[in-house]
Image: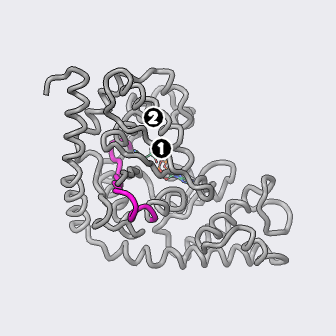
């Protein structure tokens, strides 16, 4: 069976963009691939994190995975820092990474805007650690939102370069990006992607938001000029809201548009809020029923299960590089 690898950072709260762009796709892969889903704490600390919060968020993200439907009997879930080889392989890959390859990364350029003097080496090196995550398990497919494709392209380049220079150790991974939902936009600014690190909580619907909060956030969400509920390049706000609606009810956008012909923004928004609430209700119920110590057990068992893959890949890497084991 081919392997799938993906991850989410334990920073901020998970939102419906993370769900629709990434986690929803993971669920569908569980039967056909050997899936490995990681909570990437070493990536989260590339920007400052409060230690107590990092710890709590790490468990929280794992809980979301489980509540959303990741089944630990089918897929492996684990914490990145529990497998030391991620950091070790990242160092080795650093030696074949070229500085301009990292300088052109869009996410890096976005994140350093306005805070150049405080930018850490870790943030710059973030894509190399991500390449290590993927290559360590020889994953063939990487399901992510659109913003991560550039990072996966780097992982492909590094794998090819390594294989060419040393020996055929790595599988060349492919990104798996959905046509719909790969880039959910911010509710308060539909020109930028919905992000955990957004300045305002009105940017996103967190998977843990209460029904009242959801109603309030959708009511306040930006809309476009005009009256009709239609999607289009000149209607970025509505296009985004319609995409969210369409993905959650499992109906094409055109059908949702038809349904709201002649209806008002207010009616559409009221219904959208209820659709989101209805979708999140069972997820939140499952989330609240999960016990931290139980989740920690699942995470430790996950790491234990996949440690042999990491150990084996590292042995192969070191051997062909001339590093004594
Ligand atoms: P941050 O704001 O801290 O960069 P984030 O909200 O982008 O965080 P990540 O942990 O970086 O969240 O992303 C986890 C997964 O969710 C990735 O696969 C990413 O591509 C996907 N994702 C993130 N934001 C969106 C979005 N707005 N639409 C679709 N997918 C998204
Ligand atoms: N950088 C990703 C999270 C991530 C990841 C990975 C995703 C870290 N390592 C490996 C896929 C495969 C993000 O979503 N910000």
Is disc 2 in contact with disc 1, using a CB cutoff of under 8 Å?
yes
Q: Please identify the quarter of the rendering in which residue 320 is found.
A: top left
Q: Is residue 30 magenta?
A: yes
Report the span colored magenta.
28-43
Q: Which residue is mark 2?
A: 156
Say which residue appears at 33% left-offset and 30% top-offset. 168
Please report the residue visible at 59 percent of the width from the left and 60 percent of the height from the top: 202
| Label 1 packing within 10 angstroms: few (<14), some (14-19), many (20+) | some
Q: Earlier in the sequence, mark 2 or mark 1?
A: 2
Q: Residue under label 1, please give it.
A: 174
Q: Is residue 252 above or below residue 196?
A: below
- How dense is the environment of label 2, judged by Cα within 10 Å: few (below 14), some, or many (20 and up)? many
What x and y, as percent, mark residue 34? Answer: 34, 56
Quarter of the image where the C terminus is located: top left
Which residue is rendered at x = 23% and y = 35% of the image?
314
Q: Residue at x 22, y 68 (%)?
A: 294
- Residue 309: % across, % down: 23, 45
């Amino acid at each position: 069976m081919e392997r799938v690898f993906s991850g989410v950072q334990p920073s901020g709260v998970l939102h419906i963009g993370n769900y629709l762009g990434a986690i929803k796709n993971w669920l569908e892969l569980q039967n056909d691939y050997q899936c490995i889903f990681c909570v990437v704490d070493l990536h989260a600390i590339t920007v400052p994190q409060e230690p107590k919060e990092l710890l709590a968020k790490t468990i929280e993200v794992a809980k979301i995975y489980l509540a959303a439907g990741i089944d630990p009997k089918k897929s492996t879930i684990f914490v990145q820092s529990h497998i030391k080889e991620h950091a070790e392989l990242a160092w080795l890959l650093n030696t074949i990474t070229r500085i301009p390859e990292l300088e052109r990364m869009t996410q890096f350029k976005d994140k350093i805007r306005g805070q150049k003097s405080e930018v850490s080496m870790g943030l710059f090196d973030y894509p190399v650690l991500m390449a290590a995550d993927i290559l360590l398990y020889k994953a063939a497919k990487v399901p992510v939102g659109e913003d991560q494709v550039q990072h996966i392209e780097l992982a492909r380049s590094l794998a090819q370069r390594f294989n060419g220079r040393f020996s055929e150790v790595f599988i060349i991974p492919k990104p798996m990006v959905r046509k719909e939902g790969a880039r959910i936009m911010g509710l308060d600014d539909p020109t930028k992607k919905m992000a955990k690190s957004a300045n305002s909580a009105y940017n996103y619907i967190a998977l843990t938001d209460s029904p009242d909060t959801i109603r309030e956030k959708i009511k306040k969400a930006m809309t476009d000029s005009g009256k009709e509920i239609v999607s289009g390049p000149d209607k970025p706000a509505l296009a985004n809201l319609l995409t969210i609606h369409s993905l959650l009810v499992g109906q094409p956008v055109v059908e949702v548009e038809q349904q709201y012909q002649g209806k008002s923004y207010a009616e559409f928004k009221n219904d959208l809020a209820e659709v989101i609430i209805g979708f999140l209700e069972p997820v939140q119920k499952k989330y609240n029923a999960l016990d931290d110590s139980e989740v920690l057990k699942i995470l430790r068992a996950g790491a234990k299960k996949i440690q042999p893959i990491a150990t084996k890949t590292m042995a192969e890497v070191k051997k062909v590089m001339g590093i004594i084991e």
